[in-house]
Image (cartoon, rainbow, N blue to C red):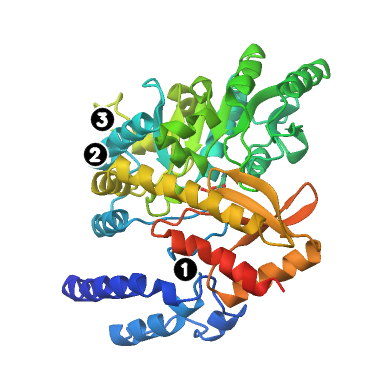
């Protein structure tokens, strides 16, 4: 394929994209394929000679879409969304066309400076103070890992990156059990270890108990451990739990510890001022991650980390060998020094197009609708005999179960997802198996959301 061919095929891809999105409602949301089926349809090795594009395209249409779960489907209510607003998809196509690698300012000046600008736009949109800098990662997992590595090095006065951890005291990190498993992963990768991630007890509202946190830190210090920081949950994945950030930050600060807030999902909702009480106090945190690629509409992947004092993270993650120097530009921002990978794709373009083409008021309207429709759906399910609400709506996420017990609820979920009109996933809350419902698909309507009630009504017997 040459660049002339690329132009022709790109036009065809644009038409295909339109058809795909226009027909999403007629497709089952979750892939209805069996494990191994796609692989079995593929040759065992790459071809030695070029194949005609027509054949490749035909195989794509035949094999790929039917075996995909459709994340942009308006009735995708599983996990959390990975919304791709049309403007952000267009920006992705342009970023792909330029195909730059933005590791240094010099390798992509516009990408670096657009990233700085977009972090500023989003900081203001979320109502955060100007003093936060920030960067864009691929994922919240990487952002949290970066924050935890920085906590570790601050506690060790950067001895860890120089000497390793073999002489270090036993490190302790704190979070509630409602925080996402990316915090566990960060503890494992950062050499802290799963056993040293202290799961602080929560109260009846699923918020970390500040007194228990203070007690755990004091007890660990007395036992000779080295506490390094606290991760605050702002919208947990299981059922949408929130820690009271102000209280946790106060305890952490009194103990001399930094804090990182995981708002990967719920952060997008903070463009609506009326939801900000849920994370009141985050302005005192050292680091906050949220994923515009979830609820906001920036095509996956795009995860923003706000950082109060970036110099600590740069000292932890940044390396500048001669081949990465920019002669005469020592003070320039090179975002690879803020993140784990060296290479970086041009993610800021998706945010720029998204925020301009939609405008914040449109995005707020969508999120407000999702929250309202989720609450309305919750009430419809509550009114159904035999259905019990397990957790009340937290923003647009709630969970329910059948009164008959876990096995019946699990069987209902399997029937719902085999049916294909909607897609829901499960969690376990206080030992009980529950079906999660999150409303957040960019193009969903109230009728799409109410389809969940129709499907449950029909299939629960
Ligand atoms: N934190 C929360 C609250 C999440 O819900 C998720 C994923 O759903 C993550 C972190 C991890 O996000 P990512 O896939 O960007 O690593």
**For the image shown, how many numbered marks are present on the structure?**
3
Disc ID at residue 264: none
User: Is residue 2 visible in the rendered structure shown here?
Assistant: yes
Expressed as whole percent of the image width and height from the top left, the position of residue 174 reads 69, 30
Q: Which residue is mark 1?
A: 70
Q: Which residue is mark 3?
A: 327
Expressed as whole percent of the image width and height from the top left, the position of residue 214 reads 73, 18
Q: Identify the element where label 2 is drawn.
A: helix
Which residue is depicted at the point 48% across and 25% down?
Answer: 315
Q: Which residue is mark 2?
A: 109
Which residue is depicted at the point 62% across and 77% down?
Answer: 35
The 10 Å Cα crowd at callout 2, few under 14, some 14 to 19, many 20 or more, is some
Mark closest to the chain's N terminus, 3 or 1 = 1
**In the rendered image, which quarter is residue 418 located in?**
bottom right
The 10 Å Cα crowd at callout 1, few under 14, some 14 to 19, many 20 or more, is many
Mark closest to the chain's N terminus, 3 or 2 = 2
Whether residue 60 sits left or right of residue 249 in the image: it is: left
């Amino acid at each position: 394929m040459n660049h002339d061919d690329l132009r022709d095929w790109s036009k065809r891809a644009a038409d295909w994209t339109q058809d795909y999105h226009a027909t999403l409602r007629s497709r089952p949301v979750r892939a209805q394929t069996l494990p191994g089926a796609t692989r079995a349809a593929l040759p065992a090795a790459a071809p030695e000679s070029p194949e005609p594009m027509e054949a490749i395209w035909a195989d794509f249409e035949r094999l790929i879409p039917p075996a995909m779960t459709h994340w942009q489907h308006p009735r995708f209510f599983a996990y959390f969304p990975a919304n791709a607003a049309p403007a952000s998809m267009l920006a992705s196509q342009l970023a792909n066309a330029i195909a730059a690698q933005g590791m240094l300012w010099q390798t992509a000046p516009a990408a670096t400076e657009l990233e700085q600008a977009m972090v500023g736009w989003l900081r203001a949109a979320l109502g955060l103070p100007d003093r936060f800098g920030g960067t864009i990662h691929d994922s919240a997992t990487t952002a949290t890992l970066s924050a935890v590595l920085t906590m570790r090095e601050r506690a060790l006065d950067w001895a860890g990156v120089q000497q390793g951890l073999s002489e270090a005291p036993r490190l302790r990190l704190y979070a509630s059990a409602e925080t996402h498993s990316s915090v566990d992963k960060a503890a494992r990768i950062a050499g802290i270890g799963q056993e040293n991630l202290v799961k602080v007890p929560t109260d009846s509202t699923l918020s970390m108990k500040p007194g228990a946190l203070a007690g755990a830190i004091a007890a660990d210090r007395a036992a000779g451990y080295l506490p390094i920081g606290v991760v605050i949950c702002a919208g947990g994945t299981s059922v949408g739990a929130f820690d009271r950030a102000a209280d946790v930050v106060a305890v952490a600060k009194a103990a001399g510890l930094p804090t990182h807030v995981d708002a990967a999902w719920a952060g997008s909702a903070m463009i609506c001022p009326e939801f900000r009480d849920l994370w009141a106090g985050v302005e005192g945190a050292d680091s906050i991650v949220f994923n515009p690629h979830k609820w906001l509409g920036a095509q996956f992947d795009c995860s923003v980390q706000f950082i109060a004092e970036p110099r600590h993270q740069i000292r932890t993650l940044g390396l500048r060998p001669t081949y990465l120097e920019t002669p005469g530009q020592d003070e320039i921002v090179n975002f690879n020094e803020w993140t784990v990978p060296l290479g970086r794709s041009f993610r800021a373009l998706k945010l720029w197009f998204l925020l301009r083409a939609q405008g914040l008021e449109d995005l707020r309207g969508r999120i407000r609708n999702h929250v309202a429709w989720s609450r309305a759906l919750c009430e419809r399910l509550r009114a159904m005999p035999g259905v019990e609400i397990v957790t009340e709506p937290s923003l647009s996420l709630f969970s329910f179960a059948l009164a008959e017990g876990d096995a019946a609820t699990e069987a209902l979920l399997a029937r719902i997802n085999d049916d294909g009109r909607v897609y829901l996933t499960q969690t376990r809350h206080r030992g009980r198996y529950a079906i999660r419902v999150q409303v957040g698909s960019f193009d969903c309507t109230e009728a799409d959301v109410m389809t969940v009630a129709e499907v449950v009504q029909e299939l629960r017997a």
